Image (tube, rainbow, N blue to C red):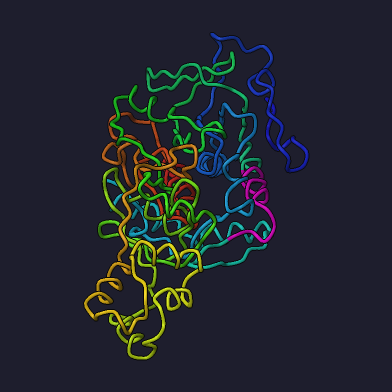
């Protein structure tokens, strides 16, 4: 065996499969473990470390050449590793109560204590988002170190070719080798960002075990606009603070116009709630009270709408909105009814996206392995003892800003404690 602790430094090199499972191992000689974790991402590594540190023999298998690839690109390379406001109402799921148990038992403060124990400097940005002062590599190094403490073995660059279950044992074939364990953890995430190797493997495997899957779709993703909104697509690069709404959901953050449509934090947030065919509403002037434009008419009757808007919005956006409203001339020459209608439209401008930029640009996935199939306390499949699902593989999706990492940590710990 080749324990992770023997690897020098914090940089990762894929463990040669022959070394990981024994040079003499053959397809009919399965290496024995207590737990096999599929996926070397945030949830998988956290679960493996926790299980290993209480004496479980743990193997992590991943088809990627190195672990934690999504961790490394997160937060602009500084890893928004949690959010101090993480709470059940910040998550989407067909069962909105499913996250309560895991989050209550392992919260943002618990993970922050782990970060500080490893000497990682951090800072809080807006809306409770916590980032590394240095690099996301520090979080990955921390997780690998935690795995090393638990003598976890990690096999990267190892495509999984078969998974079977018989006699209360799971058998996993990968890279020409075989391992067997009494517990199997699905932590391979969803299909978002396929360029990093993301696939729908978790869903295919869950279905093989008879578990239902909630139809996955891209989330935290830019939205595209149809041709009749070309005027706004011409504003590429313009950003402004807004309130974005869809149904009962609303987010006050920045919106960004792109060559294809809409992006920025407010749009990414609302995209998780948006469904094809729905409109989204944008309040371009969230700080203005009702009746503000009528007040401006009284205060500055000779001012134009464009001048008034340019004092509050980027010039190019003010021009585009005025053009769409078709309003020229001084405010004093416009009726109160016309101005009230303009103000109402500016506070609830409707866009009708024709789609999103898909899994290629989605940060996470809405949908996944149905929570109805899992115990909210342990993450274990109710109908398949010993089978667990955690992290993004499950039908739980957090808001932008560290919430999805916190779900990864919390669900991983819940599973590890139950194995």
Find residue 168 and report its image quarter.
Answer: top left
Q: Main secondary structure of the magenta part?
A: helix
In the image, is 197 to the left or to the right of 298? right
Residue situated in front as seen by the camera: 3 or 124:
124
The location of residue 179, given as percent across then percent down, is 53, 20
Is the residue 301 above or below the residue 83 in the image?
below
Q: Residue furthest bottom?
A: 299
- Residue furthest to the left in view is 337
Q: Please tell me which residue is depicted at 57% across the width and 42% down the height of the picture.
A: 70
Q: Is residue 309 above or below residue 231?
A: below
Q: Nearer the viewer, residue 298 or 114?
A: 298
State left or right for residue 97 relative to residue 269.
left
Q: Which residues are magenta?
A: 131-146
Q: Quadrant of the N terminus?
A: top right
Front one among 289 and 32: 289
32 in the magenta segment: no
State the residue lying farthest toward the right: 8
x and y percentages locating residue 359 in the rendered image? 45, 37
Q: Quadrant of the C terminus?
A: top left
Q: Going 74% across and 35% down the picture, which residue do you hit?
A: 6
């Amino acid at each position: 065996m080749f324990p992770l602790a023997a690897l020098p430094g914090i940089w990762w090199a894929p463990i040669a499969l022959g070394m990981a499972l024994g040079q003499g191992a053959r397809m009919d000689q399965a290496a024995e473990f207590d737990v096999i974790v599929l996926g070397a991402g945030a949830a998988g590594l956290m679960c493996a470390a926790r299980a290993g540190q209480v004496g479980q023999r743990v193997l992590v298998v991943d088809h990627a050449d190195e672990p934690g690839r999504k961790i490394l690109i997160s937060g602009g390379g500084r890893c928004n590793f949690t959010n101090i406001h993480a709470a059940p109402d910040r998550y989407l799921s067909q069962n909105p109560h499913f996250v309560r148990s895991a989050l209550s038992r392992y919260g943002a403060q618990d993970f922050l204590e782990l970060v500080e124990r490893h000497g990682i400097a951090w800072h809080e940005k807006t809306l409770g988002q916590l980032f590394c002062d240095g690099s996301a590599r520090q979080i990955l190094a921390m997780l690998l170190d935690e795995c090393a403490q638990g003598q976890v073995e990690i096999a990267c660059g190892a495509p999984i070719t078969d998974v079977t279950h018989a006699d209360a044992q799971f058998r996993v074939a990968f890279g020409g080798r075989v391992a067997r364990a009494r517990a199997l953890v699905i932590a391979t995430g969803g299909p978002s960002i396929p360029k990093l190797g993301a696939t729908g493997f978790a869903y295919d495997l869950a279905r093989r075990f008879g578990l239902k899957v909630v139809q996955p779709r891209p989330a935290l993703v830019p939205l595209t606009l149809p041709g009749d909104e070309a005027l706004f697509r011409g504003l590429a690069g313009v950003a402004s603070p807004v309130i974005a709404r869809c149904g009962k959901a609303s987010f006050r953050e920045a919106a960004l116009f792109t060559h294809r449509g809409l992006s920025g934090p407010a749009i990414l947030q609302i995209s998780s709630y948006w469904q094809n065919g729905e409109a989204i509403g944008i309040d371009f002037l969230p700080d203005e009270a009702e009746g503000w434009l009528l007040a401006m008419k009284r205060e500055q009757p000779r001012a134009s709408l464009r001048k008034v808007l340019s004092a509050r919005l980027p010039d190019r956006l003010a021009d585009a909105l005025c053009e769409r409203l078709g309003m020229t001339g001084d405010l004093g020459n416009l009726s109160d009814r016309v101005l009230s209608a303009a103000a109402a439209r500016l506070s609830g401008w409707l866009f009708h996206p024709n789609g999103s930029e898909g899994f290629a640009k989605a940060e996470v996935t809405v949908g996944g392995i149905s929570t109805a199939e899992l115990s909210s306390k342990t993450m274990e499949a109710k109908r398949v003892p010993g089978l667990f699902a955690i992290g993004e593989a499950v039908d739980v999706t957090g808001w932008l800003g560290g919430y999805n990492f916190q779900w990864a940590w919390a669900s991983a710990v819940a599973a590890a404690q139950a194995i």
